[in-house]
Image (tube, helix red, strand yellow):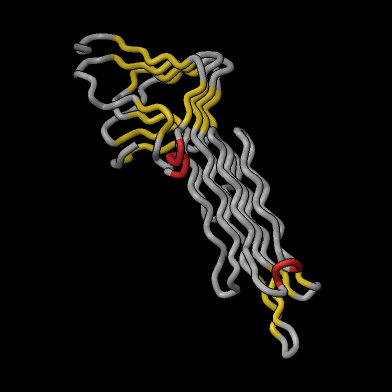
Amino acid sequence: SSAGCRVTLHVRGQVTTSGDERNQRYRCALRTGGGWESDTRLEVNVGGSGEIVGGGGDGGNGSSNEDVQGDGGRDGSSGLGVAYTLYKLTVQSGGEIRAGGGGGGGGGTGREDSRSNNRKGGGGGGGGGAGVPPGRGGLRAELDGSNEAGGRGENGDGGSSRQGGRGGRGGENDSEAFGGGGGGGGAPGAEDGEGGEGGFAYVIKSGSTIERFSGSGRIDGNTTSGYTGSI
């Protein structure tokens, strides 16, 4: 029984989001669980070498159709999920809780339509968001026929643990048709890529709270409370 006990969850390494959960905004790398018995004094202590890190969202693919915009970037995921009231959250010097960044949106295709030509410039892929694991870069638009060589853009770059990936350049076809460049991937403290929302440093479920904060470590990213869904 945990009733009347002090329970400390100590983080001394890197705790991350797994697999495709990195594209779910409210999915958290570390979750406290909500089934503790009444009067449990629950604490989370992130040590000097500890990190709780959300994953980066994937970049959107570029569009090959001038009437359809590029795919939106995917959301990044979150760091700490609090489903039972924390007596104290401590982040020691050197420790960190960090949100994942959203992926950048893919670029749209441009078209030059004249009597003699039908040129297209393909959209570039969006950059992947920052996080662990980082988001993948989106793919450039695939064009056909005479547009294949001249109008291709670039794939978006994947993100890294702390930096969103560069959006891919849009294609240029004979200086007549220009595709849109993909959006850059997001990172905490920066603008999210178009179409992808960043995760949160921590998510507090409805009915829970964090009573005390301690330590000089970093909590990097937005936070939210009162959430009623699954984390």
Q: Is residue 31 above or below residue 160?
A: above
Depth order, front residue of 140/7: 140
Residue 83 occupies which quadrant of the picture? top left
Q: Is residue 54 left or right of residue 65?
A: left
Depth order, front residue of 10/84: 10
Q: Is residue 204 left or right of residue 117?
A: left
- Residue drawn 30% across the image and 26% down it: 33
Residue 49 occupies which quadrant of the picture? top right
Q: Is residue 221 above or below residue 66?
A: above
- Residue drawn 60% across the image and 61% down it: 62
- The location of residue 206, given as percent across then percent down, is 28, 36
Q: Quadrant of the N terminus?
A: top left
- The location of residue 135, given as percent across then percent down, is 56, 42
- The location of residue 14, given as percent across then percent down, is 51, 22
Q: Report the number of numbered marks.
A: 0
- The location of residue 54, given as percent across then percent down, is 49, 34
- Residue drawn 32% across the image and 16% down it: 42
